Amino acid sequence: MNDSEPDFESRGDDGDKLSDILARLRPDANGRVTLERLDNALAERSFGAFIALFAIPNLVPLPPGATLVLGLPLILVTWQMMASRHARVWFPERIARFSIDGERCMRLLARILPWLRWIESAVRPRFWFVETRRAERVLGAFGLVLAIVVFFPIPFGNWLPALALAIIGLSATERDGYGLIVGLVIGVLSILLAGLVILAAGFLLALLF
């Protein structure tokens, strides 16, 4: 893809929002939901959609260590957005076959969908300025930095970058430039906050030892 081509995120012909697509998601015949099944459902909007999908669970209370599990897919997706030539997320076959129990997935979606619809209520196509592949790569690189911050268990440092990624992902999916700007601002603030937390922790450790 060259810099004159349009970006790879689109809403699709039916205009369904991401929450509508996820609300229709159902387990397969084995009662499982695989990443491959989810990727097929999200189709060409998969970069922004997967970023939002893996970021939003970090906004709700989850067991300790959950950010490590959810952070790895975020890193994979944002890295591909930065480096890949494909128009959608590509998962290695072994990862694509990863599945979770259908009932557990439906319960998780029930917790995610209200947050997703809340963010979606403010997102709509307008003022989209990420029109070149180079700009997409820069956006992917910034998302990768945020994904790394989400991945590491920084006290009080995961919620804001996860919110920024959720907004950025949905804005990319819906081609909302104003929403993207909001996500970028929150992302910069979250990186600064995480840096301050790390510096404060380092200073405290230096005083103690």
Image: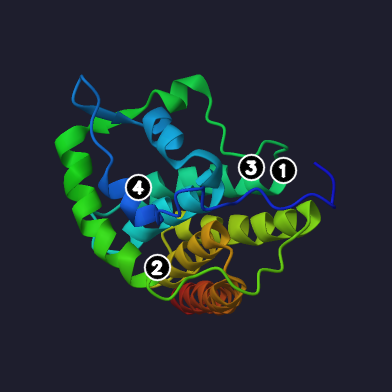
x 32%, y 53%: residue: 20
The answer to the question of whether label 2 and label 1 lie on touching residues, with beta carbons closer than 8 A, is no
Disc 4 target residue: 21
Q: Secondary structure at mark 4?
A: helix
Based on the displayed image, in which of its 4 quarters is residue 157 positioned? bottom left
The answer to whether 52 appears left or right of 24 in the picture is right
**Of the residues tagged 4 and 3, which is closer to the observer?**
4
Q: CA distance from mark 4 to mark 3?
A: 23 Å
Disc 3 target residue: 80
The answer to the question of whether label 4 and label 2 lie on touching residues, with beta carbons closer than 8 A, is no
Q: CA distance from mark 4 to mark 1?
A: 27 Å
Q: CA distance from mark 4 to mark 2?
A: 13 Å
Q: Is residue 204 above or below residue 37?
A: below
Disc 2 target residue: 120
Q: Where does the image place residue 61, in percent across and percent down from the top left? A: 23, 63
Disc 1 target residue: 83
The answer to the question of whether label 1 and label 3 lie on touching residues, with beta carbons closer than 8 A, is yes
Which one is in front, 193 or 114?
114
User: Mark 3 packing: few (<14 Cα in 10 Å), some, or many (20+)?
Assistant: many
Tell me which numbered mark, 4 or 1, is placed earlier along the sequence.
4
The answer to the question of whether label 3 and label 2 lie on touching residues, with beta carbons closer than 8 A, is no
The answer to whether 39 appears left or right of 179 in the picture is left
The answer to whether 30 appears left or right of 68 in the picture is left
The amino acid type of the residue labelled 1 equals Ala
**Of the residues tagged 4 and 1, which is closer to the observer?**
4
Q: Is residue 20 above or below residue 35?
A: below
The amino acid type of the residue labelled 3 equals Gln
